[in-house]
Image: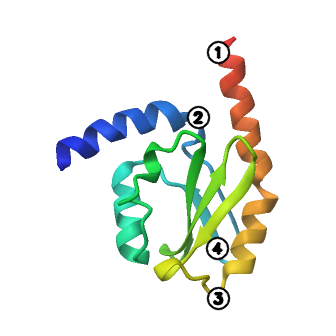
């Protein structure tokens, strides 16, 4: 399984590296990009949902974030890169946390940061 994760990590990093380091916070909430496949596993284990088992790290059109309070995962956010919208935002066992509205609002306010990093990637490809 370790070899499989390492292989997936290489592909994931190549596809999403321009988003690494993306992080924003407000109201005691920190939202940051999941930067490696092992973080998907930890997030899925902590929140008891399928972000790892359903291999969201392989989804080309998705960018995944972890919303945390005091460095504890509260919700996982999936953003559609083609639609530039929040596809889903799930907490423990796929339920909304009590911080759901604040997380959703903070994420929505910062979608422009994702868009700006996408433009950089397109510029590099030209």
Q: CA distance from mark 4 to mark 1?
A: 34 Å
CA separation, marks 1 and 2?
12 Å
Q: SS for tag 2?
A: helix
Q: Are marks 3 and 1 in contact (CB under 8 Å)?
A: no
Separation of residues labelled 3 and 2 (CA atoms): 31 Å
The residue labelled by disc 3 is 98
The numbered mark, 2 or 4, whose residue comes first in the sequence reads 2
Q: Are marks 3 and 2 in contact (CB under 8 Å)?
A: no
Q: Helix, strand, or loop for circle 4?
A: strand
**Is residue 55 positioned above or below 9 on the image?**
below
State the SS at label 3: loop
Rendered location of residue 69, percent (x, y): 56, 77
The residue where tag 2 is placed is 18
The residue located at (69%, 72%) in the rendering is 103
Is residue 27 visible from the viewing direction of this image? no
For marks 3 and 1 on the same chain, the one whose residue lies earlier in the sequence: 3
Q: Residues within 10 Å of mark 2 (few under 14, many from 20)?
A: some
Labels 4 and 3: the sequence-earlier one: 4
User: Going 58% across and 49% down the picture, which residue do you hit?
Assistant: 63
Task: Look at the image and name its color scheme.
Answer: rainbow
* Distance (Cα) linking label 2 and label 4: 23 Å
| Residue of label 4 | 29
In the picture shown, does residue 83 fall above or below 92?
Answer: above
Between circles 4 and 3, the one closer to the viewer is 3
- Whole-angstrom CA distance, mark 3 to mark 1, is 42 Å
Mark 1 = which residue?
125
Q: Look at the numbered disc 1 and give the secondary structure of its residue.
A: helix
Please tell me the numbered disc located at residue 31. none
* Nearer mark to the viewer, of 3 and 2: 3
Label 1 packing within 10 angstroms: few (<14), some (14-19), many (20+) = few
Nearest to N terminus: mark 1 or mark 2: 2
């Amino acid at each position: 399984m370790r070899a499989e994760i390492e292989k997936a990590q290489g592909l994931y990093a190549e596809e999403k590296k321009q988003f690494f380091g993306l992080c924003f916070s407000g109201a005691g909430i920190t939202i940051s990009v999941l930067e490696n496949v092992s973080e998907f596993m930890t997030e899925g284990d902590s929140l008891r949902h399928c972000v790892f088992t359903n291999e969201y790290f392989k989804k080309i059109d998705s960018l995944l974030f972890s919303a945390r309070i005091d460095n504890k995962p509260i919700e996982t956010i999936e953003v559609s890169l083609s639609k530039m919208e929040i596809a889903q935002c799930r907490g423990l066992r796929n339920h909304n946390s009590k911080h759901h509205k604040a997380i959703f609002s903070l994420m929505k306010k910062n979608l422009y940061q994702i868009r700006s990093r996408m433009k950089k990637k397109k510029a590099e490809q030209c």
